[in-house]
Amino acid sequence: MGFATDAIHAGQHPDLETGAVITPIHMTTTYAQEELGKNKGYAYGRTSNLTRQSLEANVAALEKGKYGIAFSSGIAAINALMSLVKAGDHIVVSDNVYGGVYRLFENFLSDYSLEFSWVNMNNLQNVVDAVKPNTKIVYAETPTNPMLTITDISELAKICKERNLISIVDNTFMSPYFQNPLLLGADIVVHSSTKYLNGHSDVIGGMVVTNSDTIHKRIRFVQNAAGAIPSPFDCWLTLRATKTLAVRMKQHNENAIKIAEYFRDKEYIQKIYYPGLSDHPDHELAKKQMSGFGGMISVDLGDAEKAKNFLKNVKIFTLAESLGGVESLVCHPATMTHASVPKVERERLGITDSLVRLSVGIEDVEDLILDIENAMK
Amino acid sequence: MSSKNNNKSKDTDFDNSKYSMDTKVIYGKNISNKWDYAHHVTAPISSSTTFRLDSVERGAHGFMQFANSKEFGDESPIFIYDRLGEPNKDLLEENLAFVENGEMAVTFATGMGAISAVLGILCKTGDEIITHATLYGCTISLFNNWYPRYDIKVHAVDLTNLENIHTVLTEKTKVVYFESPANPNMDIIDIQELKKVVDEINKNRTNENKIQIVIDNTFATPFCQRPLEFGADFVIHSLTKGIGGFGTDMGGVVIGRKEYRDLLLLYRKDFGAVLNTKSAWAILTYGLPTLGLRQRQQIDSAMKIAQFLENHPKISFVNYPGLESYKHYETAKKQMIDFNGNFAPGSLIYFALKGKDAAECKLNGSKFMNYVADNAYTMTLAVSLGHTRTLIEHPASMTHSVVPPDELEKRGLDAGGVRLAIGLESTNDILMDIEDSLNSFDK
């Protein structure tokens, strides 16, 4: 089936009892058991919930995977993935990931004797060089947040397969509409479904998708054992949102391309990061593994004061964390999304105090451009 | 779901009569053929506007079966489209009928949706309705603004004296409609005595011409009063109030004899005031099961507050059915009875402040309410009632603003009257705020 068809139908068959075309919100926390040891496959809401199962099957289909496992946040999903390793194991991580991942790994999981190496995955030789005998996972985000550099997923997957490592790709920025890491050989895709999957800035959620039976078994176990599940209502809202993912992503992409083009020759821009521009260093690679370039743009205004003024003066763009919603957002990575990354490390990556990250929404693009123009005056 | 457990839900012979109503409002009738999610201890929320019909034949059967119990009896419904019916409303309706001791219930989007539906199926052009003079403002508006268009005459009389029925009774009278306690002045209508009067009139009437008794039981809630047991033909509720109980959802219901369910369903389908499934679910899950708990607390507070007001030098009168001094105390005591047989005078109080003349009474009432609006932590100036929060309002300018100043008296309203709907706060906290507010101005 095509993407838009799957988005609307996968995982959602009419209610068996009533024929209800739309999946009910299964609000129960517990299920009556017929007798000891006998139930209808449902015993407790944390373990199994039909609305959640529908969402999991739906997103799994969109990511061309066998299994979807839903969590209460993207970070909860990533934390669950770290249960694939144990104390003493080593994980190679892209040096430019969401700040919350850095915080989770370096300031929390390192206390449990997990070891992390942070490398630039724009050049995969760095991954090869970082692998040690105790390495178990390679974790990448592509395009990266907020620098929008690209990692070659097929190449990364190949390196991992040869060395028997699990490859994880955070696909939040592209959404399954523009990129399917599993098709490119990755073992696991992870999402903050708070972003494009839900797309309306009203649900926090995370999602893991994989084809591997063993990985599924472990993560499914952790979902129940550690308990970071999303509520049935949030699952229902997200399920409602994936139905429009295709049309939303098309518009995010179209608007972002126009805004990136607009930025290109503006003298107040010191640097622009958007993989859709032909002079982006990874443009060709992006074209190879993505079917669009998404709605995220970062621009360096060259001067922290200028960035501050821009953030203050925009009217349609809202200064806020998060991304992927229908409304345009703008943020200051150095003090917001990536504040947990040490300053030296930030500067090295290009997350300067004058860098601004735009999450381009699906408003009329003329209005967005006018808003940017006015804020820059 | 209405089942005590999965096995019980399948057991049509299960006898729940030995259980108290408090217990039964949580489980309902204990049997439902409406949605086989009996193993879900809490019902799912139906979220589909439309339902897949396996075949044209099943679709055709569904349409024939809809609102046609004569031919199809009680067979399990075939769901077609939310406006015609879906599981959450059905589950709620079973429990609402049960708690009011009625044969059936049909829910609506709001209380006004329910009122217009029940009168819509009972009256046609040329018919007449007798009502109590004191009614909720929007009900008055329905009668004054719309019924003249249909040439349905509405006679408002004082039904606390049942003799008054005969002053407006005609061959065309089809319905006696009232609230008890009445909104906002807490008038109490003697339901059993009214039933006797209507029975006497109906003796000489053919079935289709018999007068039906319709009571809006919103102020009492089924916890305090079950009018069908006293002979009323229909009970209506604004579910938004005491039954919903949390101020989160709008809703209405008509409860009565089985023979009217088809007509009400048809009316709902064609006029479209359908209760939202998510609201039905919330009322089913949160509202109804906590009704007894909430009402007991609210009545307990209301009684103490009414007594406090009664003894306060700045208060001119207090209408609360629980006060022995109240003129309708005896009637209230007879018919406002809780699930356990105790006197249950409800959670609403109507009172006014003193003044040297009517204008000053009204001014003092306004001062009091404005002080409350600005300063009271436990009271909110807002319409509605039966909420977790204590709500206070000025009927003459708010809920009953449809009544012109020169008709207030005729409608049983005091120009400065204050309506207080007690919430779930600590009683002493509400009392403290009332006392402070009364002390906030001189005289």
Image (cartoon, rainbow, N blue to C red):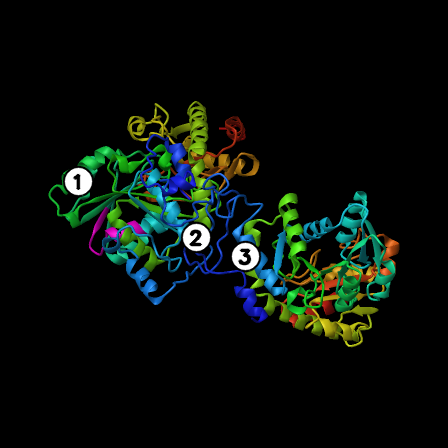
Q: Nearer the viewer, residue A90 or A313?
A: A90
Viewer-side label of 2, 1 = 2
The kind of residue tagged 2 is: Asn
Please identify, in this view, whether the residue under mark 3 or under mark 1 is nearer the observer: 3
The chain identifier of the residue carrying mark 3 reads A
Residue at position x 49%, y 57% in the image: A23
Whether residue B198 is in magenta: the answer is no
Q: Chain of mark 1?
A: B
Query: What span is colored magenta in the figure?
Result: B117-129
Q: Which mark is residue B166?
A: 1
Callout 1 amino acid: His
Whole-Å distance between the Cαs marked 2 and 3?
23 Å
- In this rendering, the count of numbered labels is 3
Q: Residues within 10 Å of mark 3 (few under 14, many from 20)?
A: many
> Which residue is painted at 73% across and 50% down in the image?
A82
A115 vs A8: above or below: above
Kindly identify which residue carries mark 2: B276
**Of discs 2 and 3, which sits in the foreground?**
3
Chain ID, mark 2: B
Real-space Cα distance between discs 2 and 1? 41 Å
Picture layout, residue B315 above or below residue A318: above
What percent of the width, then of the height, locates residue B291? 42, 36
Q: Is residue A43 left or right of residue B13?
A: right
Task: Say which element carries label 3.
Answer: helix
Q: What is the quadrant of residue B383 in the picture?
A: top left
Element at badge 2? loop
Q: Position of residue A263 (x, y in %)?
A: 76, 72
Q: In the rendered structure, are the residues bearing label 2 and label 3 in contact, judged by CB atoms less than 8 Å apart?
A: no
- Specify the amino acid type for callout 3: Ser
Residue A54's disc is 3
Secondary structure category for the residue under label 1: helix
Q: Residues within 10 Å of mark 1 (few under 14, many from 20)?
A: few
